[in-house]
Amino acid sequence: SAKVGSFTLNTVIGNQAITGVGFQPKAMIFWTAREFGGDQEYEECLGVATSSTARWVWTSNYCDYCDQASSDYDLTKCIQLFTAGALSTAADFVSNDADGFTINVTTANATSRTIYYKAIGGADVSAFAGDFALGTTTGNLAETGVGFQPKAVLFVHGPKNTTGATVTTIHQLGIGVG
């Protein structure tokens, strides 16, 4: 089963349940993008979650009038946005529920944001969200600990900053499917 939908992210901190999916998801993909400031600033994010401990988000913000660009990769959130280089919106993944999912808004913004999602589930679906370090040499790289043999994979590459701060002057994202 799969469903694409959207919801308006809460403008207050706390749990937010999204229902009406029609099944219990096993994997969630979140995305959003917005331009504002007279086409002078852009923010976007791409996040994935399979559980409250297996999730990540890539986010980017480009601000022409403030002369900077920021990107970040966070393993503790599924939704995250920066405005003018500062964290403005964030949510963590709580659970896959019988008819949807629950997130926890941890950084709220007074401006509402539309978040799009793809819910994936079903008895024949296994899913895992995680990360791994690329090797420093050429050749094959074996990733273990997933718990099943994948039939498809989604790779996303962006800067990872372990302190949670934005990486300035870098605006990059790489996506691969295999």
Image: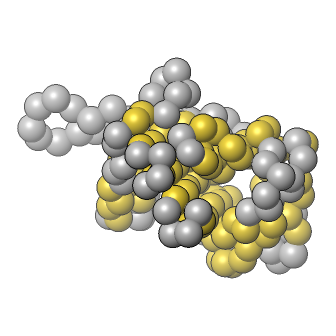
Say whether residue 9 is left or right of residue 39.
right
Position of residue 162 measured from the top left corner of the image (x, y, whole percent) = 48, 23
Q: Is residue 1 above or below residue 107?
A: below
Residue 80 image offset from top left, x and y in percent:
63, 47
Left or right of 22, for residue 155: left
Quarter residue 22 falls in: bottom right
Vertical relation: 100 (above or below) 138: below
Q: Count how many numbered circles sit on residues in the image.
A: 0
**Image position of 137 (left or right of 84):** left
Of residue 65 and residue 87, the one placed in the foreground of this image is 65
Q: Is residue 146 in view from this perspective?
A: no
Residue 176, compared with residue 70, is above or below; it is below
- What residue is drawn where x is 42% and y is 44%? 68
Residue 163 visible in the picture: yes
Instruction: Report the residue at 34% width, 50% height from top.
Output: 172
Task: Identify the image's colour scheme: rainbow, by chain, secondary structure or one colour.
Answer: secondary structure
Q: Is residue 54 left or right of residue 178?
A: right
Q: Residue at x 56, y 69 (%)?
A: 38
120 or 19, which lies in front? 19
Residue lying at 49% horizontally and 62% vertically, measured from the top left: 40
Determine the image quadrant of residue 23: bottom right
> Quadrant of the image for the C terminus?
bottom left
Image location (x, y in percent) of residue 44? 54, 58
Q: Quadrant of the N terminus?
A: bottom right
* Residue occupying the far top of the picture: 163
Residue 113 picture location, percent across and down: 74, 63
Q: What residue occupies the far left of the structure in this picture?
A: 138
Where on the picture, by quarter, is residue 96? bottom right
Judge by depth and name the residue closer to the eye, 41 or 163. 41
